[in-house]
Image (cartoon, rainbow, N blue to C red):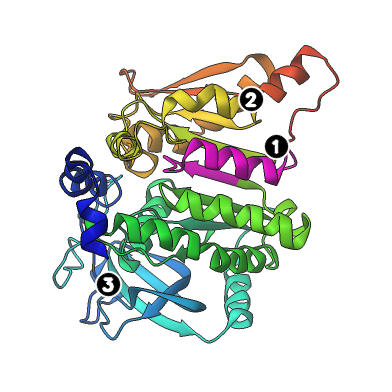
C-alpha cells in the first residue's frame, strides 16, 4: 500500500518530501537531546529549574528518553528538576545525543514519577504557593514538530531561564516521532494529542494559579487550537474562560483550518491571544510548499487575516533572522521581554494606534512589529465595541 501511494506522487513532490523535510526539521529542533543516565548533583550545574510534565507518549525503557514516540491514550506525569550548564548561552538549548556533560549540556538533577492528576495538582499548587499572591502563573508549553520528550523539556527550561520567568512550568509532550521523516506521523499525532491537552488544560485551570498561560510552537499550535475548540464544545466556556493568555509561535497550521477552528471558538477567547509570524521562517515556507503554496498561519502574509479575527500579531521577521525558533532563541526578543519594553509598547499601542515597533536596546536593526486586532481599533474609534481587558503578569 505504501509503495503504491508513493509511486502515485509526482517526482517534484517526492523531492520536497524527502529532500526538504530535513531542513524543515532543523527549524524545530537545533540538536537532538537525551537525558543523562548518570546522576548529576546541584553543585555540578549553574542553576536548576523545575518542570512538571504531562505526556500522551508511551513510557520508554530507555532512561535517556523516559518517553517514546509511541502514542498513549492515558496520560503520564513526572516532575523534573533540570540543570542549566555553566556554558549556557541565552537562546540556546545545549544538548547531546550521548551522555550529557552537566558543565556543557542541559541535564536532569532529579526525576520523579507522579501517580495521577490529583497528585500532580497538589505538587503544582505547592510550587504556586511559593509565588506572591496575585502573581501565581502557570505556564503550559506545547512543543512543535520533531521533538523528543527531552527536547521539549529542555526548550521550556531554556525559556524559563532566559526570559526570567517567575512562573510554575507545566509541559505537555505529545508523541512526535522526533525524526525529520516523521512529519506525516507528527501531523496525525497532533490530531491524536488534542484530547490529552484538553485534560491538561482542565487540570491547569483547577490549580491555585492566578493566571494560566498556554504557549505553543509550530505544529504544537495545531494541537492547541484543536484542544481549545474541544473545550468549547465539551465544557461550554468554563475552562476556556479561565485561561488568560494563548500564544502561538510560528504556528504550522493551515490558514483555512485555523479559520474554521477560531470561528468555532468564537470571539470570547482568552483576553490575551497572540500569534508570532515571520517573513523569514524557512520551515514554514517549506511546509507551505509541501501543500502547494497554501499559507501557514505563522507566515507574515496572514497578519491582516489574524487582525480581523481579533488576534494580536507580533511580526518577528527582523529579530535575529526571524527563523522558526526566534520565539525562544532570539537575543533581541529576550532583551525586549526582560527590559519590559515589549509589554510597555503593547500597552501603549492599545491606547494610541494600530501598529507599534519595539526596537532593541542595543540600537541595532532588530525590531518587533506589533499589529493590533481590528476590534481594538473599533473600540478606539468609538463604535461601541469593547477592547479586551489585559491582566498584567
Mark 3 / mark 2, whichever is N-terminal: 3
Using the image, tell me which numbered label, if any, was put on residue 390: 1
Mark 1 / mark 3, whichever is N-terminal: 3
Of badges 1 and 3, the one in the foreground is 1
- The residue that appears at 35% across and 63% down in the rendered structure is 176
Q: Residue 387 in the image: x percent, y percent?
A: 75, 28
Where 317 sits versus 100, above or below? above
Circles 1 and 2, Cβ within 8 Å, touching? The answer is: no
Q: Residue 206 in the image: x percent, y percent?
A: 70, 67
Specify few, some or many for label 2: CA neighbours under 10 Å numbering under 14, 14-19, or 20 or more: few
Mark 1 / mark 2, whichever is N-terminal: 2
User: On the rendered structure, is 361 left or right of 171?
Assistant: left
In the depicted view, which residue is nearer to us: 68 or 339?
A: 68
Q: Which residues are magenta?
A: 246-269
Using the image, tell me which numbered label, if any, was put on residue 300: none
**Residue that numbered label 3 is attached to:** 43
Where 226 sits versus 349, above or below? below
Q: CA distance from mark 3 to mark 2?
A: 52 Å
Residue 247 lies within the magenta run? yes
- The residue that appears at 39% across and 38% down in the rendered structure is 334
Specify few, some or many for label 1: CA neighbours under 10 Å numbering under 14, 14-19, or 20 or more: few
SS at badge 3: helix
Q: Residue 110 in the image: x percent, y percent?
A: 36, 78
Where 51 sits versus 25, above or below? below
Of badges 3 and 2, the one in the foreground is 2
Q: Is residue 393 visible?
A: no
Total marks shown come to 3
SS at badge 2: helix
**Residue that numbered label 2 is attached to:** 308
- The residue that appears at 73% across and 38% down in the rendered structure is 267
Quadrant hosting residue 363: top left
Amino acid at each position: 500500500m505504501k509503495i503504491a501511494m508513493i509511486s502515485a506522487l509526482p517526482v517534484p513532490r517526492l523531492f520536497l518530501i524527502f529532500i526538504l523535510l530535513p531542513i524543515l526539521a532543523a527549524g524545530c529542533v537545533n540538536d537532538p537531546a537525551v537525558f543523562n543516565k548518570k546522576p548529576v548533583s546541584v553543585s555540578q550545574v549553574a542553576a536548576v529549574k523545575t518542570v512538571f510534565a504531562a505526556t500522551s507518549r508511551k513510557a520508554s525503557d530507555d532512561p535517556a528518553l523516559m518517553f517514546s514516540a509511541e502514542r498513549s491514550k492515558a496520560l503520564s506525569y513526572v516532575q523534573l528538576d533540570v540543570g542549566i550548564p555553566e556554558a549556557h548561552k541565552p537562546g540556546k538549548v545545549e544538548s547531546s545525543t550521548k551522555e550529557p556533560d552537566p558543565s556543557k549540556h542541559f541535564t536532569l538533577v532529579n526525576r520523579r514519577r507522579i501517580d495521577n492528576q490529583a497528585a500532580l495538582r497538589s505538587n503544582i499548587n505547592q510550587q504556586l504557593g511559593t509565588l506572591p499572591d496575585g502573581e501565581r502563573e502557570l505556564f503550559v508549553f506545547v512543543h512543535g514538530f520533531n521533538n523528543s520528550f527531552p527536547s521539549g523539556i529542555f526548550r521550556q527550561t531554556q525559556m524559563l531561564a532566559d526570559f526570567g520567568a517567575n512562573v510554575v512550568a507545566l509541559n505537555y509532550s505529545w508523541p512526535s516521532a522526533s525524526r525529520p521523516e516523521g512529519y506525516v506521523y507528527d501531523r496525525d499525532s497532533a490530531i491524536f494529542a488534542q484530547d490529552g491537552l484538553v485534560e491538561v488544560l482542565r487540570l491547569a485551570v483547577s490549580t491555585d494559579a492566578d493566571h494560566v498561560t498556554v504557549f505553543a510552537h509550530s505544529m504544537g499550535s495545531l494541537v492547541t487550537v484543536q484542544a481549545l475548540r474541544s473545550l468549547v464544545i465539551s465544557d461550554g466556556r468554563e475552562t476556556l474562560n479561565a485561561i488568560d493568555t494563548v500564544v502561538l509561535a510560528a504556528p504550522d497550521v493551515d490558514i483555512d483550518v485555523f479559520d474554521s477552528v477560531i470561528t468555532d471558538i468564537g470571539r470570547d477567547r482568552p483576553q490575551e491571544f497572540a500569534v508570532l509570524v515571520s517573513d523569514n521562517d524557512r520551515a514554514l515556507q517549506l511546509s507551505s510548499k509541501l501543500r502547494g503554496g497554501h499559507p501557514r498561519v505563522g507566515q507574515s502574509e496572514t497578519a491582516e487575516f489574524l487582525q480581523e479575527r481579533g488576534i494580536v500579531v507580533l511580526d518577528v521577521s527582523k529579530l535575529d533572522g526571524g527563523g522558526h525558533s526566534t520565539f525562544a532563541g532570539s537575543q533581541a526578543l529576550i532583551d525586549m521581554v526582560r527590559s519590559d519594553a515589549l509589554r510597555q509598547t503593547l500597552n501603549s499601542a492599545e491606547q494610541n494606534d494600530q501598529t507599534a515597533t519595539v526596537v532593541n536596546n542595543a540600537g541595532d536593526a532588530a525590531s518587533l512589529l506589533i499589529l493590533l486586532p481590528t476590534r481594538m481599533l473599533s473600540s478606539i474609534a468609538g463604535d461601541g465595541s469593547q477592547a479586551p481587558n489585559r491582566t498584567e503578569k
